[in-house]
Image (tube, rainbow, N blue to C red):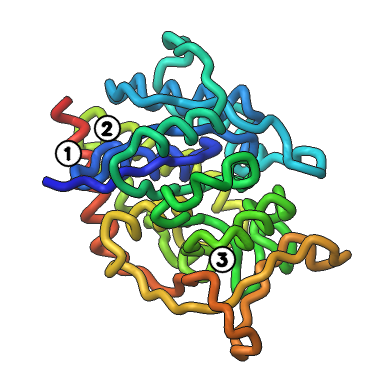
Amino acid sequence: MKKTPVIIDCDPGYDDALALVLALGNETLDVKAITAVAGNVPLERTYKNAVRICHYFGKEVRIGLGAVKPLVRELETGEMVHSPSGLGGVTIPEEVPMPKKENAIEVIKSVLEEADEKVTLIPIGPLTNIALFVSQYPELRNKIQEIVIMGGAAREGNRTASAEFNIYADAEAARIVFESGIPIVMAGLDVTNAFQILPETFSEYRAMGKTGVFVSEVLERYFDFYQTLGGVFKGPAIHDMVPVAYVIDPTVCVAKEYHVDVECCGEFTYGRTVVDFGGLSPDKNVKVLFESDHQRIIGMLKDSICHLNRR
């Protein structure tokens, strides 16, 4: 079976953890590396959580240590959503063997240089690492198939009225990536907010062995935050699974091409992804996702759970 080579750049984080389950357990993806960035929680925790997750599932994957803060601004985390540790309440070992630390940018560089085919990048946190990479090694851009981002919003945001968290966290980095000329897919809030896993289904995962228990615990802890939103969501929105599912099978989402800019100056609009719905720019630089097939993605998740259980 031909596998799609990918690098996942992440900031685990509850929904990042579920995205990693989906990716690591999927038989059509070849996860060449995972790189950690500061975002949902500080870098030391996102890196450690990535190591913990891979160790728990017996996966030997290169894990790179990335940017500790945004390019220009100070770090603003999402600890109120993801707990100070990023995976609070999830019972996987805290103390695990730590690999030799590798710089995330150099990990991406070496994976691309060694690859026989183009590699897909899946950044599901702030885009700091990806911006640093494309700035430092522009000659390797042609080794990237596409960058499939969890971030942005064509309509309302979730960090501010205008901006989604991952883009707001480092809008300057996001602008570099969106202007890089590399094919971009944006799985923003327009598609990810609708991808909710309902609490009445959590027990189904708990019954699916070791991996299912992990998934259920993540969902339960993540839902603790969503319950504070006053019923706006029926279940936690698992944002970061959507771009991974798209890479597995692009037909699970509806994509439309637009020109997208990133706002870096506005007092009220910093971090907004400005989608040119009117077609004023002929340069359509981004595929924007708007709909997903919920049941097919859930099926992918269950398949990954079963596959990881067999390890």
Q: Amino acid at mark 3?
A: Val
Indicate the position of residue 249 as horizontal and vertical percent values. Answer: 26, 61
> What x and y, as percent, mark residue 37?
59, 35
Give the residue at x 35% y 49%: 118
Q: Earlier in the sequence, mark 3 or mark 2?
A: 2
Q: Looking at the image, do the residues carrying marks 3 and 1 touch, with CB atoms under 8 Å apart?
A: no
**Which residue in the protein does label 3 denote?**
232
Q: Is residue 88 visible?
A: no
Name the N-terminal-most of marks 1 and 2.
Answer: 2
CB contact under 8 Å: marks 3 and 2: no
Q: What residue did someone put label 1 on?
A: 306
Q: Position of residue 164 (x, y in %)?
A: 64, 59
Give the foreground label among 3 and 1.
1
Dot placed on the residue nearer the N-terminal end, 3 or 1: 3
Image depth: mark 3 or mark 2 in front: 2
Left or right of residue 258, residue 206 in this image:
left
The residue pinned by badge 2 equals: 211
Q: Splitting the image into 4 quarters, where does residue 208 fall?
A: top left
Q: Quadrant of residue 246?
A: bottom left
